[in-house]
Amino acid sequence: MQYRDFGKTGLKISALGFGAMRLPNIMNVILEDEAIAVIQRAFDLGVNFLDTAFVYGESELVCGKALKKYPRDKIIVSSKNPMWDKNYTDTHWRRKLELSLKRMQLSYFDIYAVWHDVRMDAYLESKKVENNWLKEALKAKKEGILKHLIISCHDTPENMIKLFEEGYLEGMILQYNLLDRVNEKVIEYAHNNGLGIAVMGPVAGGKLGSPSPEIQGLIPGGSKSTAELALRFVLSNQGVSTAMSGMNTVKMVEENCAVASSEKPLSEKELKGIQAALDEKKKLADLYCTDCKYCMPCPNRVNIPANFSAMNSFRLYGLKEHAKHVYKHLTERKASAEFCKECKKCEEKCPQKIKISEQLKEVALTLKETA
Ligand code: SF4
Ligand code: SF4
């Protein structure tokens, strides 16, 4: 396993982190014992970072049980405080922190996302509240309950950098993968300023887990799997401290650990080749649909951008299994292309002037036929 600096915190974090969002998962029949075995296999193979959150169902409880077998200082443990109920007071924030610690049977967190999925407008609003959460977060750090404060964010790269400029954060959890490189400038900023970066979604929430000859063939000689190339791509960015993967099986843990243990990042030439090919594909995808959502809502509940995104996955990235899966899910919710009644109300709102109803027919034909 490779270990990297998490900014200037002094923590040596494993290049592969364990994201415990989906463990345990009753819907997919991953029960507690199995979840614990998967997490512990990762620890035994050198993963030393475990990330969970207050809102991940039973995850904190199960992670706490998985940790019991290991000396406390061997694993870097992180959780996140949700602020989605818009109660920004110090007491409310503290109650959630203490409940997370209690569930996990811990006395401190090494890393703590003071706000789970922060948006700048809500952040600024929260700071106007008297006795707000931030004072409590800084106090908890002084008390030693929280060793390092970070934040998790899906906002714009500009707002992410503004959050760093607040001065108290030592790192950030953000999205980054082969298909979504918009946060590269934030990663670069963090790297230049000694801040840690934990990447969520290195395989695009499982999207890059399905086979794709197009993506696997982006490097000379090809890669064993789409997921392998996706992980190698993320870890080749030296600003990334750790890539958190939501692993459901021991097999997945073993495969990912093998990739994260390899000292060979992608070469400069390979990276440039991948970036150029992806930029080209992205341009084609943008011509097709930019996901601006101006066409929504459709009176017949068709999720237009989601259908086009599935089609792009199929046509441009060769992610056929993933595209079929998404389309099937849309059909179950009566939101797939085949529910379009060709009223064309959406077309006047599309800045790309896409002939939406015509294109949806093609989507239905392609994805329904192959479903
Ligand atoms: S043309 Fe189809 S997708 Fe567009 S608004 Fe009408 S029913 Fe919805
Ligand atoms: S308005 Fe056009 S470009 Fe925007 S999401 Fe709808 S179809 Fe895509």
Image (spheres, rainbow, N blue to C red):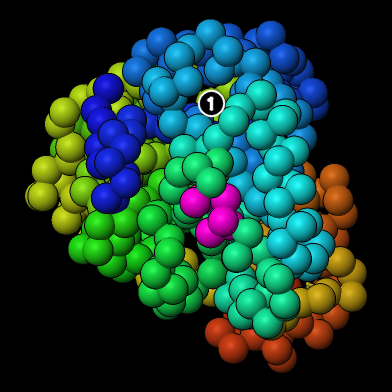
Q: What range of the chain is rendered magenta?
A: 137-142
Amino acid on which the number 1 mark rests in the picture: Met
Q: Position of residue 354 (x, y in %)?
A: 60, 80
Query: Quick one: which residue is furthest to the front in this view?
Result: 143
Magenta span: predominant SS is helix
Q: Which quarter of the figure has residue 137? A: bottom right
Report if residue 141 lies within the magenta region. yes
Question: 10 or 333: nearer the eye?
Answer: 10
Judge the density around disc 1: few (<14), some (14-19), many (≥20) Cα neighbours within 10 Å: many
State left or right for residue 77 relative to residue 33: left
The residue located at (65%, 16%) in the rendering is 65
Q: Does residue 177 appear in the picture of this structure?
A: no
Q: Which residue is mark 1?
A: 247
Question: 260 or 349: nearer the eye?
Answer: 260
Vertical arrangement, residue 47 with respect to residue 7, above or below? above
Q: State ligand 1's quadrant.
A: bottom right
Q: Position of residue 7 (x, y in %)?
A: 29, 50
The residue located at (89%, 69%) in the rendering is 300
State left or right for residue 212 relative to residue 62: left
